[in-house]
Image (cartoon, rainbow, N blue to C red):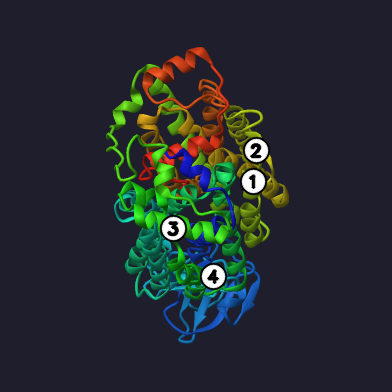
Amino acid sequence: NYNNLFLFLSLCRYQIFLYFICAFQNISCGIHYLASVFLSVSPQHTCRPPGNVSQVLFQDLSTWQLEDIWTQFSVGREDRILVQLQDGAIWELTSCQRFRRDDQSSLDYEYSGQKSSFPCLDGYIYDRSKWLSTVVTQWDLVCNREWFGRLIQPTFMFGVLLGAVIFGYLSDRAGRRLVLWASSTGVFLFGIAAAFTFDYYSFIVARFLLAISGSGYLVVVFVYVTEFVGMKSRTWASIHLHSFFAFGTMVVALTGYFVRTWWIYQIVLSSVTVPFVLCCWMLPETPFWLISGGKYEEAQKVIDTMAKWNRTRPCKLSEILSLDHDGSAGNKPSQVEKHTLSELFYDWSIGTRTLILWLIWFTGCLGFYTFSLNSVHLGGSEYLNLFLMGVVEIPAYVLVCLGMDRVGRRNILIFSLLSSAVTSGVIMVIPKDYHVWLVVASMAGKFFIGAAFGLIYLYTAELYPTIVRSLAVGSGSTVGRVGSIVAPLCIYLSSVWIFMPQLLVGTLALVSGVLTFLLPETLRRPLTTTWEETEKESSSGKLLSTTSNTVLENVTVENSEDSSLNK
């Protein structure tokens, strides 16, 4: 218990300085998590003819260049383009196939004679009116190679899952500062490397390593911030790290609007990391990690620096720790006992609670990315749509901070999930041509699912005793990342039915919201240490004047390996 040290770490200018340096890098993480929205755009395309074109015919349009017909060409594969080559051969071109007419006497659009089918061995011609190039056009990820393009985002999210495990472990062994520097440097280097890859596979590898680095940063930065920020402002500071992630979404939209070449787009987005890489050497190690490793002199130097910046009276670490240890400051904290996943199913009631929370974590991540990734398919300006999906997150987190200490965590969570389900249903009944209303309804859905996702970390921490609290949060976060892997695949279900993503998210949100009624309220209830205390607390309903800040500091100090506000 380091409560006296937390009292010293009040939110002053030094902590504000550190907070905004670390939060700025969250923008970069938000950027790369959604960069594929425009990286992997699949424009309209058709097979390239096997020669130079002399005339093009498409329905009632006749021209000399294939590029002139894209304004009337349908996304569907039923349309065909008729071209006559300079050698007189007449070919019918579709998105994924081409046919050579045996009768070359007339250039009529309608033809009932014999024709031979050929694959698109000469590549494809793409509509470059919006994007000069994407990774899809770079490596022809269309037709029978279309699934390669669809794997870009899921493989990235799998890297996110792996990075959380790797860097969460390293942060407890090597320290927060080193991991912050290493992960942010990795984000920059692998982000730049992705722009200069020579084939699809090297691009996927670079993006995978980028995801590992970005996820590692998000895992550790939450722990780092909560170990420096004072008790009074910890809840706001930690939850609003999400807001900087939302700014990253807005940067993606703006960059996509102004930069239409994928590798330049990737370089511009990766350059956002440069300021943090240049400044991260100024970040100190957290006193808590130094103390946990017995490095009291180094911890004292950090505290002295903080006192100097904040213009407060320096304090002796030995005096603070002596209030928490019945011996000298040199005593090392006892080893934390390891617990297994099976303990989250301590009995029938706790097992049910765990499964419900896992479903909420999964739904939160799935809905968060489904609304964001699907925004570019709503009609109108895809850049404005994505930008608004980032903007709407910020008031969602404000709602969480203001509401959870007034009406309760469970009530806010239920309201957010059920509202998200309702808005998903509303989206399904709005005609496709009413794209403005589709965007407004999607913004509402993103608002509510973002509020639920912003709250679930804290709520999960409060529902479990100290001995398994970090395990509960870590397992829930892992299940959430599975949801983020499924989200891009969910978007592709729109080819089966246009509203299939909304149906899936809405159904899961509805079920999650209803099941949340089975969970207890944790507002102003004391934190428990053992399962016995948890059972007694649930039955007594005793209130205690604790705040959500206490939860965050307890989770942080106990075990940072599994704690994160990871997207």
Mark 3 residue type: Val
- The residue at the far bottom in this view is 86
Q: Find the distance from the CA under tag 4 to the CA under tag 1.
A: 36 Å
Q: Find the distance from the CA under tag 4 to the CA under tag 3.
A: 70 Å
Query: Which numbered disc flags the more N-terminal residue, 4 or 1?
Result: 4
Which mark identifies residue 442?
Answer: 1
In front of the other: label 4 or label 1? 1
Q: Is residue 461 left or right of residue 380?
A: left
Mark 1 residue type: Ser
The secondary element bearing badge 1 is classed as: helix
Which mark identifies residue 152?
Answer: none
In front of the other: label 4 or label 3? 3
Q: Which residue is mark 3?
A: 302
- The residue at the far top in this view is 539
**Percent x, y for residue 125?**
49, 74
Q: Which residue is mark 4?
A: 81
Mark 2 residue type: Thr
**Percent x, y for residue 67?**
58, 77
Q: Find the distance from the CA under tag 3 to the CA under tag 2.
A: 49 Å
The secondary element bearing badge 2 is classed as: helix
Of residues 414 and 524, the one drawn nearer to the viewer in this rendering: 524
Query: Which numbered disc flags the more N-terminal residue, 1 or 2?
Result: 2
Confirm or deny contact between disc 1 and disc 2 (CB under 8 A). yes
**Percent x, y for residue 66?**
56, 77
Q: Find the distance from the CA under tag 1 to the CA under tag 3.
A: 46 Å
Q: Residue at left 59%, top 82%?
A: 64
